[in-house]
Each structure stands twice: as structure tokens, then as C-alpha cells.
Image (cartoon, rainbow, N blue to C red):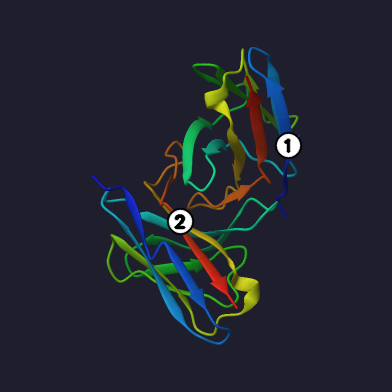
Amino acid sequence: ELKVEQNPLFLSMQEGKNYTIYCNYSTTSDRLYWYRQDPGKSLESLFVLLSNGAVKQEGRLMASLDTKARLSTLHITAAVHDLSATYFCAVDKNQGAQKLVFGQGTRLTINP
Amino acid sequence: NAGVTQTPKFRVLKTGQSMTLLCAQDMNHEYMYWYRQDPGMGLRLIHYSVGEGTTAKGEVPDGYNVSRLKKQNFLLGLESAAPSQTSVYFCASSRPGSYNEQFFGPGTRLTVL
């Protein structure tokens, strides 16, 4: 059974600092997705990672995938308040139809 | 384009009542999904559909039924609501292919008393 674990679950940081969110998963998959959710809102797609060594960057966020270690990271560079949100990783079960298993989410708070 | 829409946005039910949640998408996507989101547990897949007239079970299908009579609509039914079904329900849609992300609706907050 595929399990997806994120850490930390809660993260409070200051503007300007760097930090990394980790996403570990338990069975083989080479398809991983990162989503952002603002409080009371829906989920917004951030990155799609489809192969070992994949790296995607958008603004202050960079995501990577290591399928051998079954690990993805979401790195935040020089955080700004607007990045405060909950971040989810989701792993495809590779059973067709893009059946995703989500991590618990990391609630990120960035303080001025 | 409206994207993915959900009706209703909020609903309160009594135990044993039934209801249907409607999801509609205007992006001509083949795949549609229903998830529930509970605190501290991320999203869990309830049912999904890979095309009009087809449905399949996800991780947590018990107590729910679905139908996809039209490509653009995906209905989630609760025949006899239970307090354990109190949750936020999200619908999503996507094109086939791993490189295509899922697009999510705004969610329905359901409370079962």
C-alpha cells in the first residue's frame, strides 16, 4: 500500500529565510505532484515531476524528485509572506487514471 | 472558462438523510475524481471516472455512490449520511496522461449532525 509522508507538518519561518519541505513515499513511483492550498480555498497545481532527477522551479519555489530514495523536496528560497499556505505532495499509484495518494500537508506560515 | 464548479458550497444534513453533490467541468476533461479532505489527513480519493458512463472505487468508497452520465458532470451521492462523512469534498478533473495535473473545484463543506 502506498503511503506518503510529509515533514514537517507545521513550519513557521521568517521572511527572507530558506527552508525545505520533504515528501517521502513508500512504494515505487516516478510521478509526483505538488499542490498549494490557501485557507478555505481549493488546491492549485504547482509542479509535475515525472522522472528521476526531475527539477522544476517557479519563482522562489523549486521542487525535485529522487525516485531511488522515494523522496521529493520543495525548497523555498528567501521566503515572502505571500507563500504562506498549506503545501501537499501527491504520488501517483501507477495503476492508471492518475490515482493520487496525498501527503498530510505542510502548513507554512511566513512571518514578516 | 469556469473550470471546475461544485454545487452546493455548504450543506448541513441530519444522520440518515441523503444528498447529491454535483461537479461540473467545462475543460472537456476525460478523467474526474471525488476526494474528501479531513484535518491532518490530506485528501483521500473516494471514486473516480475515466470517461462518460464509467466509474471506479478509490481509497474510501464506502457510503458513497457516483454517476457520470455526461462527460462534463460527475455526481457524488450519500444515500444515508453519517457523522463520519462530515468533511470537505473536492472534485477534480484532468486529461489522460501523467504529465497533466488535476484541476480542483472550490469544495463543498458538509456537516452531518
In the depicted structure, whether residue A44 falls above or below residue B54: above
- Left or right of B11 on screen, residue A39: right
The residue wearing badge 2 is B107
Q: What is the CA distance from the residue labelled 1 to the residue labelled 2?
A: 23 Å
Side (left or right) of B13 relative to B3: right
Which quarter of the figure has residue A15?
Answer: top right
Q: Residue furthest bottom?
A: B16
Q: Amino acid at mark 1?
A: Phe
Q: Is residue A57 left or right of residue B52?
A: right
Near mark 2 (Cα within 10 A), the count class, few <14, some 14-19 or many ≥20, is: many
Q: Report the chain holding disc 2.
A: B
- Label 1 marks a residue whose chain is A
Q: Quadrant of residue A77?
A: top right
Mark 2 is on which residue type? Gly
Q: Nearer the viewer, residue A41 or B64?
A: A41
Pointers 1 and 2 within a single chain:
no
* Residue B29 image point, x, y percent: 32, 51
> Could you tell me which secondary element the residue under label 2 belongs to?
loop
Residue that numbered label 1 is attached to: A10
Q: Nearer the viewer, residue A103 or B68?
A: A103
- The single residue placed furthest to the left in the displayed view is B1
Query: Please, is residue A15 above or below residue B6 in the view?
Result: above
Residue B97 position within the rendered picture, expressed as x and y whole percent measured from the top left: 42, 42
* Residue occupying the point 64% across, 12% down: A16
Identify the residue at image location x=56%, y=80%: B81
